[in-house]
C-alpha cells in the first residue's frame, strides 16, 4: 500500500505542475508586469535551474535504489512544491518581452514548460514505484530505464535554462544569430553545389525509364526510325543545352547576391553583437531601454526571415522559376540591408547605438555632437556599401 503522505505530496506536485503550465500557456502577448528596476530575475532563474537539477538527481536515485523510502522522496517533492517550482515560475513570468525581448521571453517560457512537462513524467514514475508493493526489491529494468531517460531530459532542460540565464540577453542574441547564420551558410553552399545539368540528366533518365517500364512494349508501338538521310545528317546545334545554360546564368546571378549575405551578417555579429553588447546581463540591475529591445527583436526576426528566403530561392531554382528566384534573393538582400542599417555607422550611428545602452557611445553627454567613428563602425559601413552595390538583374 502506498504511503499516505507521499500520495498527498504527489497530488500537490501534479496540481502545481498543471497550474504553472496553465499560467505559462495563458500569458498575454506582452507578458506580465515588468520587475522592479532594482531586481533582475536572471539570477533567480539560474539558481532555480541548478537546484532543480540537483534535486532531480537525488529523486531519481531514491526511485531506483532499494529500499524505496517514501519519507525521503516526500521531502524532496515538498522542497520542489514549496520553493523551487514557484520560484522557477516567478522567474519565467518576470522575464517579459518588454524587459528582455520577445525572443528571449519566448525561449524562457518554452524551456520552462518543457521542464515542467518532463518533471511530471518523473513524478508519474515515483507514483508507479510507490504502488508496486515491493519497496525492498529492485525496480524493474523498464522502470530504471524510464527513470534514467526522464532524469536526462530534466537535466538537459535545467542546463539550457541555466545557460540562458547566465548568458543573458547578449549571449542569447549572439547564439540565435549564429544559428541562423549557419543555416544561411548551408543553404548558400547547397545552391553553389547544385548542378543544373543534373536536372537534365534526371529528365533523360525519366525518358529512358518510360521505355524500360512498358510505354513501348509492342513492336507496333516502337518509335519509328528516322529517315536515312536524317540519320546521316549531324545536328548543327543542341537546343536542349540552352535551358541548362539559362539555369547556369540564373544560378550565377542569384549567387552574386546570396554569397554576400553570410559575410555581411558575420560582420554584424562580430562587430556589433559580440563587441557592442555586454558579456552578460545576468547581474545587471538596470532594465534595458524598450527601444533597444525592439532593435534586437527585429534583428533576430530579420535574420530568420533571411534564412527562410534563401531556402525559398533554392526551391525556386530547382523548379526553374527565374523571376521568383531573383525576386526572393533580392528580398533576402533587402532584409540584410535593413539589419545593417539598424546597426550601422555614419548617418545610422544613432540606430547602431540603440542596440543596448552600453552602445550609446556615439553622443557626448549633454550635447548632440558625435565622437569619432569607431573601427567597428567603419567595418559595418564598408559591409553595408558592399551588400548594397550588388545589382538585381534577371538573366
Image: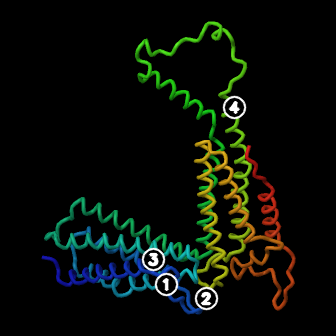
Q: CA distance from mark 3 to mark 2?
A: 21 Å
Dot 3 corresponds to which residue?
50
- Element type at marker 4? helix
User: Do labels 4 and 2 touch, CB within 8 Å?
Assistant: no
- Spatial CA span between label 1 and label 3: 10 Å
Give the distance between the C-alpha atoms of the residues marked 3 and 4, in whole angstroms: 63 Å
Mark with earlier residue (3, 4): 3
For discs 3 and 4, the disc positioned in front in the rendered view:
4
**Relative to residue 295, is residue 141 depicted above or below?**
above
SS class of the residue under badge 2?
Answer: loop
Q: Give the side of residue 285 with respect to residue 392, left or right.
A: left
Q: Secondary structure at mark 3?
A: helix
- Residue tagged by mark 2? 285
Q: Are marks 1 and 3 in contact (CB under 8 Å)?
A: no
Sooner in the amino-acid sequence: mark 3 or mark 2: 3
Q: Is residue 276 left or right of residue 60?
A: right
Q: Nearer the viewer, mark 4 or mark 2?
A: 4
Q: Nearer the viewer, residue 210 or 111?
A: 210
Pointer 3 local density, CA inside 10 Å: few below 14, some 14–19, many at least 20: some
Mark 4 vs mark 2: which is more N-terminal? 4
- The residue singled out by tag 1 in the image is 44
- Left or right: residue 142 versus residue 262 is left
Within 10 Å of the Cα at label 2, are there few (<14), some (14-19), or many (20+) other Cα atoms? few
Mark 4 and mark 1: span between their CA atoms? 65 Å
Local crowd size for mark 1, using a 10 Å CA cut-off: few (<14), some (14–19), many (≥20) = some
Amino acid at each position: 500500500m502506498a504511503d499516505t503522505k507521499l500520495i498527498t505530496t504527489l497530488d500537490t506536485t501534479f496540481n502545481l505542475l498543471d497550474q504553472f503550465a496553465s499560467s505559462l500557456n495563458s500569458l498575454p502577448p506582452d507578458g506580465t508586469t515588468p520587475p522592479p528596476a532594482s531586481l533582475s530575475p536572471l539570477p533567480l532563474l539560474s539558481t532555480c535551474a541548478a537546484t532543480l537539477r540537483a534535486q532531480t538527481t537525488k529523486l531519481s536515485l531514491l526511485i531506483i535504489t532499494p529500499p524505496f523510502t517514501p519519507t525521503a522522496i516526500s521531502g524532496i517533492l515538498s522542497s520542489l512544491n514549496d520553493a523551487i517550482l514557484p520560484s522557477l515560475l516567478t522567474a519565467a513570468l518576470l522575464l517579459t518581452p518588454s524587459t528582455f525581448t520577445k525572443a528571449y521571453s519566448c525561449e524562457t517560457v518554452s524551456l520552462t514548460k518543457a521542464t515542467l512537462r518532463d518533471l511530471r513524467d518523473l513524478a508519474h514514475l515515483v507514483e508507479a514505484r510507490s504502488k508496486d508493493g515491493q519497496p525492498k526489491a529492485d525496480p524493474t529494468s523498464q522502470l530504471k530505464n524510464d527513470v534514467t531517460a526522464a532524469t536526462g531530459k530534466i537535466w538537459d532542460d535545467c542546463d539550457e535554462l541555466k545557460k540562458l540565464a547566465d548568458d543573458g540577453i547578449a549571449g542569447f542574441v549572439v547564439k540565435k544569430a549564429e544559428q541562423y547564420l549557419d543555416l544561411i551558410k548551408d543553404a548558400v553552399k547547397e545552391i553553389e553545389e547544385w548542378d543544373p545539368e543534373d536536372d537534365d540528366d534526371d529528365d533523360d533518365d525519366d525518358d529512358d525509364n518510360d521505355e524500360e517500364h512498358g510505354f513501348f512494349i509492342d513492336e507496333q508501338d516502337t518509335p519509328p526510325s528516322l529517315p536515312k538521310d536524317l540519320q546521316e545528317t549531324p545536328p548543327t546545334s543542341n537546343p536542349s543545352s540552352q535551358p541548362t545554360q539559362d539555369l547556369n546564368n540564373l544560378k550565377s546571378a542569384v549567387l552574386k547576391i546570396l554569397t554576400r549575405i553570410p559575410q555581411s551578417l558575420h560582420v554584424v555579429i562580430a562587430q556589433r553583437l559580440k563587441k557592442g553588447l555586454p558579456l552578460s546581463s545576468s547581474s545587471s540591475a538596470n532594465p534595458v531601454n524598450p527601444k533597444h529591445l525592439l532593435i534586437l527583436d527585429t534583428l533576430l526576426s530579420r535574420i530568420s526571415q533571411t534564412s527562410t528566403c534563401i531556402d525559398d530561392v533554392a526551391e525556386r531554382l530547382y523548379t526553374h522559376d527565374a523571376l521568383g528566384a531573383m525576386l526572393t534573393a533580392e528580398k533576402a538582400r533587402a532584409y540584410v540591408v535593413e539589419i545593417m542599417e539598424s546597426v550601422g555607422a555614419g548617418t545610422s550611428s544613432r540606430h547602431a547605438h540603440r542596440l543596448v545602452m552600453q552602445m550609446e557611445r556615439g553622443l557626448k553627454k549633454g550635447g548632440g555632437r558625435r565622437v569619432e567613428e569607431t573601427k567597428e563602425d567603419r567595418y559595418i559601413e564598408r559591409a553595408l556599401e558592399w551588400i548594397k552595390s550588388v545589382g538585381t538583374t534577371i538573366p
